[in-house]
Amino acid sequence: MQRLRNHYETRGYPATGIYSCELYASPSSKFWMSPAYGREVLKVDMFWFKQSKSDPLKDFYPQFWQLFRDLDYTLHWAKALIDDVAYLKTQYPRWDDFMALRAKMDPDQVFVTEYWRAHLGIAA
């Protein structure tokens, strides 16, 4: 909380805009690729609205990814993923199991888009 407050105070509106931030606790999950897999977590949901002319993956979210990097954050797949497969692998204890199951269930990569290929390190 202090880290966010300090970031908002020092960086101000040019960096953070007028967007809100949602904080909420989450119970542990049995889903392998959940940010809460096997542990209770505090989720930090940074809001960004489509009306902005900037690209949030380049101009908004990276400042928060950097701000929390030393806390070993785990991203929610439905929000955004960073272009750092090595880091993502460290955040999901069952990464290799998931990737093996993914390959078994979709051997022809019907459900693999360029987005997932880039973000999950799936070779063609």
Image: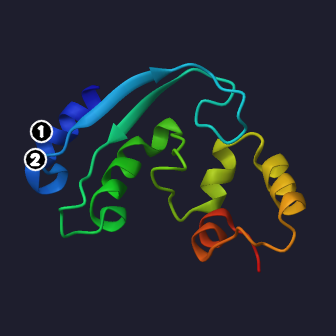
76 is higher (above) or lower (below) than 38: below
Characterize the local packing of mark 1: few (<14), some (14-19) or many (20 or more) Cα atoms within 10 angstroms.
few
Percent across and percent down for residue 46 are 31, 43
Mark 2: amino acid? Gly
Q: How is the image coloured?
A: rainbow
Q: Residue at x 25, y 60 (%)?
A: 50
- Report the side of 65 relative to 9 (left or right): right
Q: Residue at x 31, y 53 (%)?
A: 63
Tell whether label 2 touches label 1 (CB within 8 Å).
yes
Location of the C terminus by quadrant is bottom right
Q: Which residue is mark 1?
A: 9
Furthest residue in direction front, as rendered: 110
Measured Cα–Cα span from mark 1 to mark 2: 5 Å
Circle 1 sits in a helix, a strand or a loop, which is it? helix
Percent across and percent down for residue 23 are 34, 27
Q: How many marks?
A: 2
Q: Which residue is mark 2?
A: 12
Q: Residue at x 69, y 25 (%)?
A: 38
Percent across and percent down for residue 42 are 45, 25
Location of the N terminus by quadrant is top left
Q: Residue at x 9, y 50 (%)?
A: 13
Mark 1: amino acid? Glu
54 is higher (above) or lower (below) than 35: below
36 is higher (above) or lower (below) than 13: above
In the figure, residue 123 lies in which quadrant?
Answer: bottom right
Furthest residue in direction right, as rendered: 104
Most foreground residue, 33 or 11: 33
Circle 2 sits in a helix, a strand or a loop, which is it? helix
